[in-house]
Amino acid sequence: MPQTARDVSSSGERGFSIPVSGTDTPPCPPTLANAEACGDLPTNSEKSDLNWGMANRSIFVAAMASLSAGGFLQNHAARSTGLALFAGKSLHKAAKAIRDNDALAAAVNTAQAGGAGLWSWGVASASSTMKGTGPAVMALARLIDVAAAGKNNENLIGDLCEVAELALLSAGAFMGKAPVQAAGFAIEASGALYDATRQHDALSATITSVQACGAALWSWGVASDSSALQGVGPAIVGASEIARIANMFRSGRETGAILPTHHSPSVRAPSPQIAGAAQMTPSGAVVRNDVPSSGTSPRPIPSPVGRGSLQAM
């Protein structure tokens, strides 16, 4: 269940104040007309990132539902469909990377899409060669991305777990050894638990921990050839991701981030209050963007968080 590269999100938690003659002007009034200038509204880029992230996670949930059905029914067509959805998810991320002018992320996600497509083909045709080649291509793409991140990679352990998982899934398919593939899912569960300890809020940590449990059950099901566990595992992972999407949607509604971005210009003219304050600024005064405009910082847009390899298959 590998994740392709780079979910991008930012919070844009900024205030606006202008020191005038040694004293600060009052914070700009919290009206819709000047809220964005004060830093209280998310930018178009932040809105777009959140919407892209929600769409990406929705594809993930659909894929998990298909894989769950395939596990319960031992149906190759349903499993193949789930993997095909992961190929579409990677293409979706590649399109975003192209929009963001990130050539490496676009290449990595495109390669991941190709690998998932080969994997899907292998499952549909019962070809061990294709079932092994698909995750191998995905593992290589992820390894290149991890190497490119180098020392700046803050999630090195989780990313290496993902590469190891894909490598084991590939080796297990080539050898026809279910225990080897089960070990891949077990590594995924371990990586998810590690990621859960690094989350900044209780809800994200809980969701990621539940996904780790789902991966562990999936591993057990593959090792024991239990169709029930092979269905329950991905079902738990998908259901927990629905909770994450619901939280993203709620937070987006509260911050105004879930809005049609093409109707909201990214830069607004400052309100009369701000314009007047700017005219009062003496020569040499410094305009500061790092001080909150009120006693509390604006609520940040939640970053899409979660286990890397639990975000794609």
Image: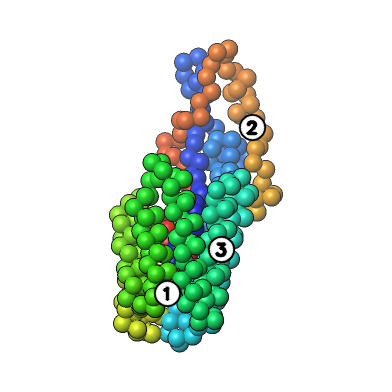
Label 2, label 1: how far apart the Cα atoms are:
60 Å
Kind of residue at disc 2: Pro
Q: Residue 67, image x and y in percent?
A: 47, 77
Is residue 301 found left or right of 156 in the rendered image? right
Please report the residue visible at 50 percent of the width from the left and 82 percent of the height from the top. Answer: 126
Is residue 166 found left or right of 252 in the rendered image? left
Mark 2 sits on what residue? 270
Q: Earlier in the sequence, mark 2 or mark 3?
A: 3
Q: Earlier in the sequence, mark 2 or mark 1?
A: 1
Specify the farthest residue to the bottom: 73
Kind of residue at disc 1: Ala
Label 3, label 1: how far apart the Cα atoms are:
19 Å
Please report the residue visible at 40 percent of the width from the left and 64 percent of the height from the top. Answer: 167
Please report the residue visible at 35 percent of the width from the left and 58 percent of the height from the top. Answer: 161
Mark 3 sits on what residue? 113
Judge depth for marks 3 and 1 and give the one in front: 1
Mark 1 Cα within 10 Å, few/some/many (few <14, many 20+)?
Answer: many
Specify the farthest residue to the top: 283
Nearer to us in this view, 68 or 25: 68
Q: Residue 265, image x and y in percent?
A: 67, 43
Mark 3 Cα within 10 Å, few/some/many (few <14, many 20+)?
Answer: many
**Residue 295 visible (yes or no):** yes
Kind of residue at disc 3: Ala
* SS of the residue under disc 3: helix
Judge depth for marks 2 and 1 and give the one in front: 1
Please report the residue visible at 49 percent of the width from the left and 74 percent of the height from the top. Answer: 129
Is residue 86 found left or right of 228 in the rendered image? right
Q: Earlier in the sequence, mark 3 or mark 1?
A: 3
Mark 1 sits on what residue? 173
Nearer to us in this view, 74 or 119: 119
Quadrant into which the N terminus falls: bottom left
Q: Residue 2, image x and y in percent?
A: 45, 63
